[in-house]
């Protein structure tokens, strides 16, 4: 059975990661908003007040160039003076006071804030600093550090959640295996939490199902063996009955029961690959031979195979049984206006696929997963008009599994059904 990929938005893991990321981004937005709306405006306002106070005190002392250079080194503030006592500057890159007041600052150092004040002697001072740029740089580094830390926390939480949810993935694989018919599934128990308890319950369930299926198969096998003796006695007793319609009807019923018993025993012989003798040979002659048997029956067979020989290890008689069963079913359910049954081959790497496609009414989608089960029939009434006991496809599946291959079925886009037989070429 092909497992359909689960939509991402339905995954518990994706939901947990999404919640974690949403919380991380919400926290980051909160911190950024706190800095931008509260910390940075308040700090800028406080800085401006301190600078205003400092400039007034500095001008009151009427400093010279030496005192200004000392203050510049201590406080990282550049100072320029223009007035009656001359013109001097602690940095040659500072613009003139006239340029600052007129806004002509092209070519000046980037990131500088300027303030001009009138000196007591009638001159003017220019103060230049980078406090705003420094504050913004510190805040930016702090935010980047916070972002890196949050990314680290998210990645660590991602790895932790992925490890924590591994039992869910193992359970999912176990359920898929059980759905495909594997009864030897055992999901590893690595934790002792709720997932571990659930895994243990699943393993116990698989063991019980396996025992039930084995008991059912054993019962069918025992009953089949026990029925052979009564059937033999019935066939012998029929030989003493006079010829007539009653004897013919009873003989047909006995033969029908004998075929069912033989099919049940054959089903058991094929278990675990027993009852198959594989020989390396070409597949194409077998396909041509089986197709020729049905060529004269309506609606006919259309054979489409490669001309190149395909060598495979097969039990020709057993594989012939599979092909005959599939073609017999295709002809049995064909409609008056059905197209010929398609029998074709295709190669994909080391595998060869044989395709049997009919143009009948098709198999209901709800029955596709059950048609390979013993005694399952699409016709619930089990009418004799459709014949069979629901064992043919079960035998086909056992034969293909004994060859190390598979048999699958799909509904056609229009109408009808297609069976695919897959075999390894080497």
Image (tube, rainbow, N blue to C red):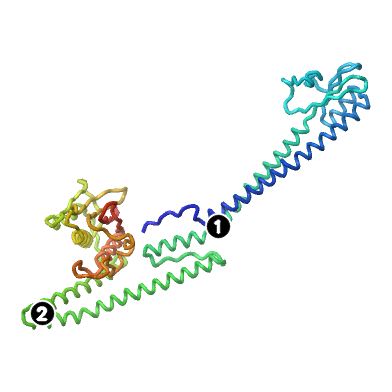
SS of the residue under disc 1: helix
Instruction: Determine whether, in the image, residue 140 is placed left or right of residue 269.
Output: right
Residue 364 lies, with reference to residue 238, above or below; the image says above
Residue 158 screen position, x and y as percent: 57, 52
Front residue of 383/377: it is 383
Of the two numbered discs 1 and 2 in the rendering, the one whose residue sits closer to the viewer: 2
Residue 136 lies, with reference to residue 211, above or below; the image says above
Residue 104 quadrant:
top right
Which residue is at a point 79% across and 39% down the rendered structure image? 43
Which residue is at a point 43% across and 69% down the rendered structure image? 206
C-alpha span from label 1 to label 2: 72 Å
Which residue is at a point 75% across and 21% down the rendered structure image? 103
Residue 359 screen position, x and y as percent: 22, 54
Quarter the N terminus occupies:
bottom left
**How many C-alpha atoms fall within 10 Å of the one at disc 1: few (<14), some, or many (≥20)?**
few
Residue 271 lies, with reference to residue 311, above or below; the image says below
Residue 75 screen position, x and y as percent: 84, 32
Which residue is at a point 19% across and 72% down the rendered structure image? 259
Disc on res. 163:
1
Disc on res. 187:
none
Front residue of 380/302: it is 380
Residue 241 screen position, x and y as percent: 8, 83
Query: Count the marks: how many?
Result: 2
Disc on res. 246:
2
Instruction: Determine whether, in the image, residue 251 is placed left or right of residue 37.
Output: left
- The answer to whether residue 361 is visible is yes
**How many C-alpha atoms fall within 10 Å of the one at disc 2: few (<14), some, or many (≥20)?**
few
Q: Give whichever of discs 1 and 2 has the lower sequence position.
A: 1
């Amino acid at each position: 059975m092909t497992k359909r990929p689960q939509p991402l938005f339905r995954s518990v893991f994706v939901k947990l990661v999404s919640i974690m990321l949403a919380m991380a981004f919400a926290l980051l937005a909160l911190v950024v908003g706190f800095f931008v709306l509260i910390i940075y405006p308040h700090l800028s306002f406080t800085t401006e007040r301190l600078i205003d106070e400092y400039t007034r005190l500095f001008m009151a002392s009427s400093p010279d160039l030496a005192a200004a250079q000392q203050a510049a080194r201590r406080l990282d503030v550049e100072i320029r003076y223009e007035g009656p006592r001359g013109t001097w500057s602690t940095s040659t890159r500072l613009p003139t006071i006239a340029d600052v007041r007129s806004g002509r600052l092209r070519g000046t150092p980037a990131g500088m804030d300027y303030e001009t004040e009138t000196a007591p002697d009638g001159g003017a001072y220019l103060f230049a600093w980078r406090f705003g740029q420094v504050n913004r740089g510190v805040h930016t580094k702090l935010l980047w550090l916070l972002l890196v830390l949050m990314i680290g926390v998210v990645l660590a939480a991602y790895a932790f959640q992925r490890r924590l949810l591994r039992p869910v993935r193992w359970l999912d694989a176990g359920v898929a295996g059980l759905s495909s018919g594997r009864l030897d599934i055992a999901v590893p128990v690595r934790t002792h939490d709720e997932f571990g308890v659930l895994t243990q319950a699943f393993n116990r369930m698989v063991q019980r199902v396996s025992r039930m299926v084995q008991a059912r198969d054993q019962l069918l096998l025992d009953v089949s063996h026990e029925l052979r003796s009564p059937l033999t006695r019935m066939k012998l007793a029929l030989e003493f009955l006079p010829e007539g319609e009653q004897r013919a009807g009873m003989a047909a019923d006995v033969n029908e029961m004998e075929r069912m018993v033989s099919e049940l025993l054959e089903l058991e012989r094929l278990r675990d690959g027993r009852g198959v003798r594989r020989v390396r040979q070409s597949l194409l002659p077998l396909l041509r031979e089986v197709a020729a048997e049905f060529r004269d029956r309506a609606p006919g067979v259309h054979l489409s195979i490669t001309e190149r020989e395909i060598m495979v290890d097969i039990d020709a008689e057993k594989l012939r049984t599979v092909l005959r069963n599939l073609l017999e079913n295709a002809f049995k359910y064909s409609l008056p206006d059905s197209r010929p049954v398609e029998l074709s081959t295709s190669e994909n790497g080391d595998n060869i696929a044989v395709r049997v496609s009919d143009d009948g009414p098709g198999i209901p989608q709800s029955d596709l997963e059950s048609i390979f089960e013993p005694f399952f029939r699409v016709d619930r009434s089990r009418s004799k008009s459709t014949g069979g006991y629901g064992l043919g496809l079960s035998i086909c599946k056992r034969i293909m599994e004994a060859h190390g291959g598979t048999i699958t079925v799909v509904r056609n886009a229009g109408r009808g059904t297609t069976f695919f037989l897959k075999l390894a070429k080497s």
